[in-house]
Amino acid sequence: MAALVAAGRGRRTLLLEKNQRPGLKILVSGGGRCNLTTTLAGSELEAQFGARAGRWLRHALRSFPPVALRQLVEDAGVPLREEDLQKIFPVSQKARDVLDALLRVAAAADVQLRHAAPLRALVREGQQFVATVPQGELHAASVVLATGGVSYPKTGATGDGYAFCRAFGHTITRTVPALAPLVVEVPWVQALQGIVLEAAELSVLDEHGKVVRSRRRPILFTHQGLSGPAPMDLSGDIEERPGGATLRFDFAPDVRAEQLEQQWLEQTRSHGRAAVASLLPRTLPERLRATLCALAGVAGTLAELGREQRRRLLLLVKDLRLPVAKSRGFDHAEVTRGGIALAEVDPRTMQSRLVPGLYVCGELLDVDGPIGGFNFQAAFATGRLAGLHA
Ligand SMILES: Cc1cc2nc3c(=O)[nH]c(=O)nc-3n(C[C@H](O)[C@H](O)[C@H](O)COP(=O)(O)OP(=O)(O)OC[C@H]3O[C@@H](n4cnc5c(N)ncnc54)[C@H](O)[C@@H]3O)c2cc1C
């Protein structure tokens, strides 16, 4: 994006890509379908990145909102459509179409693309930058670093940009994997592998039991722990905390605990001979209902259920807590949390505040969003600003 916008302004633009092919992350995105962006806009969109980064991104996102990104890709011949949770995908369901469209626009703007050309070193000499690639030295008036983070390193994102920026005096905030599946070595969790929960609420609690973030999105139980949108969205908050954090499940998020207990008491009076598991929300898969009863140590009929047992079951349904130490790490993370400190980059141009002529954009920055097309949106919007000013 940065290259095609810069070239579109008439700048002689060379795009260095270390892989044999550009845009591998676009190809693997959204399960090969590329969740390009979102229908959210304005402050709702900015809020997805958290208060601090959302404020910093405001200019980039308002000057190139999701509708503008959609327009660019559609004008390049790729029809898009909205799916669940405000997500935008190509109608063809092929990430390759998005990548090809961007490459077509870049070629039309006269971007020269050099692949298998990893940037090895970058220094400033007088008014120029000298970039070293295996093929030799290159000279440039301005440089845009768009080398990504360190997640999914097999796609080429190996953190090279951090080293270049650090050498220029930039601060790199702590990087942790985000949007990664969680490792939970608890037998009952692993025994539930294959189950998908649609209607539960998952929260990360801090050491004082305060909610850090909650998600009401699908949860997938796997042989390694938990995956799917809700656990992945929360993984960065767990990784950020030394030693991990506590996850809380609320399996009946639409009803308060007292109301639920009241309903259970009425059910017990009217259907005393029903099995205890019949108290649990019907939205929960059978195997999970059985597991919750086993964890609460309850069995038999409603009439046999004592007050203490009922309370134990209620606690598990509304407030089941699970310590989680880590995610599956950068190899499985869709995004890197942390990166180049935002205070050192001008949010209106993406120019480094320390090095004139150096621009930084995309995931390399200390910006990350949840699942839903937000990370591409931020990368493309910041890339465009860099391309407009470099
Ligand atoms: C499996 C997966 C699925 C995802 N799905 C989605 C999704 O559906 N929607 C969404 O919004 N986001 C998704 N993301 C996140 C999104 O892909 C990234 O946030 C986004 O690609 C970041 O863009 P970027 O240009 O900053 O970095 P990248 O896309 O990582 O691009 C960096 C490029 O720089 C190159 N490079 C690195 N170092 C050098 C060097 N020294 N010299 C030359 N080139 C170099 C790399 O090879 C790479 O091509 C997904 C991520 C993954 C891993």
Image (cartoon, rainbow, N blue to C red):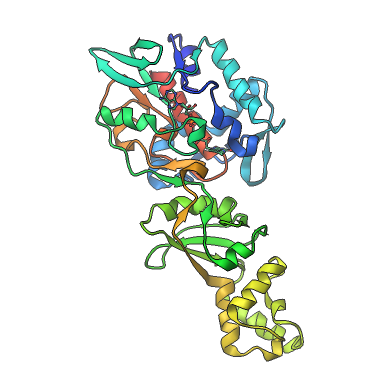
Q: Is residue 347 visible?
A: no
Q: Nearer the viewer, residue 158 or 355?
A: 158
> Residue 147: image x %, image y %?
43, 28
Q: Is residue 58 visible?
A: yes
Image position of 224 with respect to 10: above or below: below
Residue lying at 53% horizontally and 20% vertically, measured from the top left: 20
Residue lying at 26% horizontally and 17% vertically, measured from the top left: 124
Image position of 251 with respect to 68: above or below: below
Direction from residue 233 to residue 128 in the image, left or right: left
Q: Nearer the viewer, residue 323 or 379?
A: 323
> Residue 169: image x %, image y %?
24, 30
> Residue 16: image x %, image y %?
45, 18
Image position of 40 with respect to 237: above or below: above
Residue 311 lies in quadrant:
bottom right
> Residue 83: image x %, image y %?
68, 41
Residue lying at 43% horizontally and 37% vertically, measured from the top left: 150
Residue 129 lies in quadrant:
top left
Image position of 370 with respect to 137: above or below: below
Residue 277 lies in quadrant:
bottom right
Look at the image and tell me in which quarter the C terminus lies: top left
Q: Nearer the viewer, residue 256 or 359?
A: 359
